[in-house]
Image: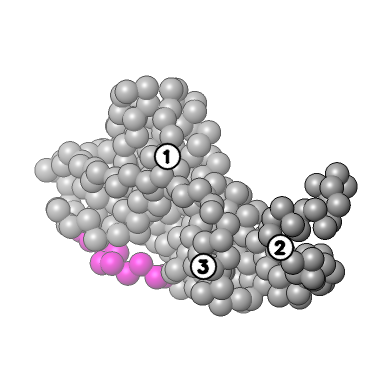
Amino acid sequence: MRGEHAIKTLCRVLNVERSTYYKHYNTPESKRSIENQEIRRAILSLYTKSKQRFGAPKIQLRLAAEYGIKISIGRVYRLIAGMALPKMSTVRPKPATNAENTNTDYTNVLKKQFNPDAPNKAWVSDITYVRVNGRFHYVCAVIDLYARKLIACKASAKMDVSLTLSTFNAAYVSRREPTGVIFHSDRGSQYTAKDFRRRMDEVHFIQSFSAKAHPYDNAVSEAFFRYLKHEEVNRRSFSTLAELELALFEYAHFYNHARPHSANDGLSPVEMEECFLIKI
């Protein structure tokens, strides 16, 4: 508009003093304002990369880790509030239930010791369900407790021992075939089946089970599935198993490499394990 009309005319029409107009255009932008613009760009990048999963606390952690920007949580909240970022849609997950095999010894070896001092000392596993084209499909995950790292995640149209076996085998290979690991799960028949027990014996794993109706015995797996559903699968619909598998693959990479975890003092699982390797 400045190129089309005289400044005097514009100020008269808009009821603005000419001195106010010139002050606005001639005053250099403050250092704080320029800094806020840079931080907003970093926040937007983190928010986009996380697919709207990060709130202010996690954004504060990643600003420091990825950009070297160390600011207060209050400032992060204020900047986000001024950006009008779209909020992530969420749905509360329903608890999953499992069948029980009455011919199994249900010893709880883990006993809620969720913080081993090294990787490959204790793994936990569980199964949840996801709708695919209107039908239930099932997701099995295996997590190493040391850094809460997701070491295997598989999906299937059937909740059977084939699912738990294939997921365990993927985890076993990815961790270079360790031995003597505690493997904790609930009492579902997918974990108590003879084929699964036989596999545990073959690789010298120590099987551990939650008490019946005590989900907190496997709290880490329960928490992971809350994150998975809250941050990924409940935000979208799936037409095919392949679509679900791709979403799980992408989320696993995000969860392991970019998602700060409170049990790791804000480090991602990969960062936590890298710190362990540096110390040894």
Q: Looking at the image, how many numbered discs can be counted on the residues? A: 3
Q: Which residue is drawn at 58% across and 65% down?
A: 79
The tag earlier along the polypeptide, 2 or 1, is 2
Query: In terms of image quadrants, where is residue 124?
Result: bottom left
Which numbered marker is on residue 235? 1
Mark 1 lies on a secondary structure that is helix
| Three-letter code, disc 2 | Val
Which numbered marker is on residue 111? none
User: Residue at label 3?
Assistant: 77
Foreground of the two, 9 or 262: 9
- The crowd level at tag 2 (other Cα within 10 Å; few <14, some 14-19, many 20+) is few
Q: Position of residue 141 (x, y in %)?
A: 40, 45
- The crowd level at tag 3 (other Cα within 10 Å; few <14, some 14-19, many 20+) is some
Mark 2 lies on a secondary structure that is loop
User: Residue at label 2?
Assistant: 16
Camera-nearest label, 2 or 1: 2
| Three-letter code, disc 1 | Arg
